[in-house]
Image (cartoon, coloured by chain):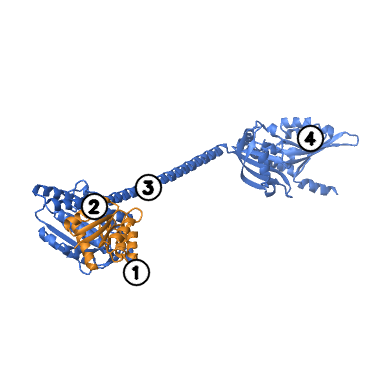
């Protein structure tokens, strides 16, 4: 069974690293990449991923705004959002609780990310 | 009047009366004459009147031509007493003549003027004395008449005013002063008030020089209260004024100096303030920079870490590549901890991380943290002693922060006991002087005396990296947290190889407990 993951991060190395580690851990992963907010929203609509990994700090539309857009749209509301954050402040943590479903702090390990993703997907099912 | 009455008057007169014949011989005298000259009646009879006078005085009397003029009043002379001494007398003589104008004798009325003379002499003497004082006084004395003209002044006045007695005589006293000073003096109403002591003004010398003087003026009045003149006593106060001016200029100088000093202090303070502000700003930049760099390190560190994971999964490393990956992972981990600690420190420093104070029993907190490390202590073979005083009061602290501090201290102790044989960890919690006192004591490598304080400075251990979680930021973070709780933390150690203890205190009453009461 394929696990379709969309990662939205302006840093292409992160996107690539996440794709490589997830597919190395579990061959069921199919990782899609988007490098800014609008592109991400477009891909969510087009590809209907099982989960969205969302970077917070992005130029233009930031992770928070993308998260809000996803949760406001009835079509995408049910897709779990996992924030990838480099910030530890309460606002970000709160944001994870309000618009996202969980957050994982950078730097993180592949196995940890895998575990968190699977935990979210389990919740949805 | 009958002759008898004349006789009585003659005999009882308090003046000496003598009568002589045409040949200037005494023919009659009264009792007072005897008293005045110390003679008896018969001693005088037909005695030449000349014999009663010292020769010099007789000649003077003769020169007065009384016989020709017939009369002379109050001629002052001397007479010889019986005992040979002289007596001062005032004599009035009347020459007696018959119908034909022929001289028949004379009547002399003599008064003793010894007393008067003495009084006069005394007066003269006294005047002389005053004159001496007047002239030799070290003050200038000026006497004026009712029209304010100078009528007398002493030697010192000549000197002070630069005019001789002759020059000054009958000159208006106002000529002694510059016009403005005279007008100023006039406004003092001294003539009306009658007296004025120590009035300070200036006098004017004929050469135009002005001299500072101190003058006391007394207005002289007659019995009816009419002004008849004045006495002025003046002193030259040039020296005093000079001293005063010098004092004033010294004072001014001092004032200026102190003002200059004040200004300088103010300027320096301002500079210092600016410097302080600049330091604050630089420290802020440093903190921001530290935060920014650490923050920015996270993304590449994530990629590096993930890539190492990916490679290890793809390659299935053999023994030697395994070692390479271990080094890579260990260092990435260390960098991750370092970034975390720095960001933690920065967020405490900038105030982004705030104290969330709740009521806590520190004893229970310590027990909890110790328990969570139980497995660690056992695996490292560490003997733990926990001494927690009973009935400790609860205090308002941030629970997570306190646990962080305790965990930090325990981790440090465990870490630094790695090489010691006898591993003991003693933790004490007690109440002491309004504080909760906590001590974490170990038998580790100890601390160099010079490092006891620097230990708490941020980034202390950087550059001495030994791996693991020990970034060197731990104690700096502890101190920051204690600072936010109005507490204090310090280290003690008997020296290298002799173990160390970290002690800290937390006030039982702090700003959070006060806020909670509101």
Specify which label sits upstream in the sequence, 1 or 3.
3
Both on one chain, marks 3 and 4? yes
The quarter of the picture where residue A101 lies is bottom left
- Mark 3 lies on residue: B276
Eyeballing the image, is B59 above or below B225? above
Identified at 27% across, 51% down, the residue is A12
Both on one chain, marks 2 and 3? no
| Residue at the extreme right | B100
- Determine the secondary structure under disc 4: loop
User: Residues under labels 3 and 4: Cα distance?
Assistant: 126 Å
- Mark 4 lies on residue: B25
User: Residues under labels 1 and 4: Cα distance?
Assistant: 138 Å
User: Residues under labels 1 and 3: Cα distance?
Assistant: 36 Å
Circles 1 and 4, Cβ within 8 Å, touching? The answer is no
Q: Given the image, what chain letter belongs to the residue carrying mark 4? A: B
- Mark 1 lies on residue: B517
Percent coordinates x, y for residue B461 in the rendering:
21, 48
In the picture, the quarter occupied by the C terminus of chain A is bottom left
User: Residues under labels 2 and 3: Cα distance?
Assistant: 48 Å
Percent coordinates x, y for residue B283 in the rendering:
33, 48
In this rendering, the label closer to the viewer, 1 or 4: 1
In this rendering, the label closer to the viewer, 2 or 1: 2
Q: Given the image, what chain letter belongs to the residue carrying mark 1? A: B
Q: Bin the neighbour count of mark 2 within 10 Å (Cα to Cα): few under 14, some 14-19, many 20 and up.
A: some
């Amino acid at each position: 069974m394929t696990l379709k993951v969309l990662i939205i991060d302006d840093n292409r190395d992160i996107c690539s690293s996440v794709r490589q580690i997830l597919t190395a851990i579990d061959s069921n992963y199919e990782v899609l990449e988007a490098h800014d907010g609008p592109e991400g929203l477009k891909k969510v609509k087009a590809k209907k991923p099982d989960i969205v990994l969302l970077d917070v700090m992005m130029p233009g539309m930031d992770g928070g705004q993308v998260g809000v857009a996803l949760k406001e749209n009835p079509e995408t509301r049910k897709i779990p959002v996992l924030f990838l954050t480099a910030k530890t402040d309460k606002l970000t943590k709160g944001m994870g609780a309000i618009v996202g479903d969980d957050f994982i702090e950078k730097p993180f390990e592949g196995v940890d990310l895998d575990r968190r993703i699977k935990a979210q997907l389990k919740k949805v099912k | 009047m009958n002759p008898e009455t004349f006789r009585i008057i003659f005999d009882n007169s308090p003046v000496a009366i003598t009568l002589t014949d045409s040949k200037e011989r005494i023919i009659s005298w009264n009792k007072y004459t005897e008293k005045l000259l110390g003679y008896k009646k018969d001693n005088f009879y037909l005695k030449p009147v000349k014999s009663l006078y010292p020769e010099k005085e007789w000649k003077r009397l003769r020169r007065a031509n009384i016989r020709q003029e017939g009369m002379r009043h109050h001629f002052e002379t001397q007479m010889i007493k019986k005992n040979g001494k002289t007596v001062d007398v005032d004599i009035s003589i009347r020459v007696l003549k018959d119908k034909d104008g022929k001289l028949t004798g004379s009547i002399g009325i003599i008064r003793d003027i010894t007393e008067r003379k003495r009084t006069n002499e005394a007066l003269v003497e006294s005047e002389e004395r005053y004159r001496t004082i007047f002239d030799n006084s070290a003050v200038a004395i000026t006497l004026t008449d009712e029209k304010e003209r100078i009528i007398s002044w002493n030697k010192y006045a000549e000197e002070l005013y630069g005019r001789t007695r002759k020059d000054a005589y009958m000159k208006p006293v106002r000529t002694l002063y510059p016009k403005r000073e005279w007008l100023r003096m006039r406004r003092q109403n001294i003539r009306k008030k009658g007296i004025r002591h120590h009035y300070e003004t200036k006098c004017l010398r004929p050469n135009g020089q002005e001299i500072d003087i101190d003058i006391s003026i007394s207005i002289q009045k007659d019995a009816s209260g009419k002004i008849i003149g004045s006495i002025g006593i003046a002193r030259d106060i040039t020296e005093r004024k000079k001293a005063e001016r010098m004092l004033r200029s010294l004072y001014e100088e001092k004032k200026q100096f102190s003002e200059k000093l004040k200004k300088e202090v103010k300027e320096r303070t301002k500079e210092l303030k600016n410097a302080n502000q600049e330091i604050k700003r630089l420290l802020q930049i440093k903190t921001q920079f530290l935060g920014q760099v650490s923050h920015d390190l996270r993304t590449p560190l994530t990629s590096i870490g993930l890539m190492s994971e990916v490679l290890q999964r793809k390659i299935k490393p053999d023994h030697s590549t395994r070692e390479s990956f271990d080094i890579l992972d260990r260092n990435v981990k260390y960098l991750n901890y370092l970034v975390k600690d720095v960001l933690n420190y920065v967020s405490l420093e900038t105030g982004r991380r705030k104290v969330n104070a709740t009521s806590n029993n520190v004893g229970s907190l310590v027990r909890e943290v110790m328990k969570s490390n139980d497995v660690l202590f056992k695996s490292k073979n560490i003997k733990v002693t926990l001494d927690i005083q009973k009935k400790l009061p609860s205090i308002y602290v941030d629970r997570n922060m306190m646990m962080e501090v305790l965990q930090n201290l325990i981790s440090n102790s465990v870490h630094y006991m790695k090489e010691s044989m006898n591993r003991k960890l003693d933790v004490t919690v007690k109440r002491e002087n309004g504080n909760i006192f906590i001590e974490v004591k170990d038998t580790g490598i100890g601390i160099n005396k010079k490092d006891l304080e620097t230990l708490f400075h941020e980034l202390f251990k950087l550059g001495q990296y030994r791996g693991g979680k020990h970034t060197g930021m731990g104690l700096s973070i502890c101190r920051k947290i204690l600072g936010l709780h109005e507490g204090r933390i310090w280290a003690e150690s008997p020296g290298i190889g002799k173990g160390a203890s970290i002690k800290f205190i937390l006030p039982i009453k702090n700003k959070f407990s006060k806020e909670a009461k509101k």
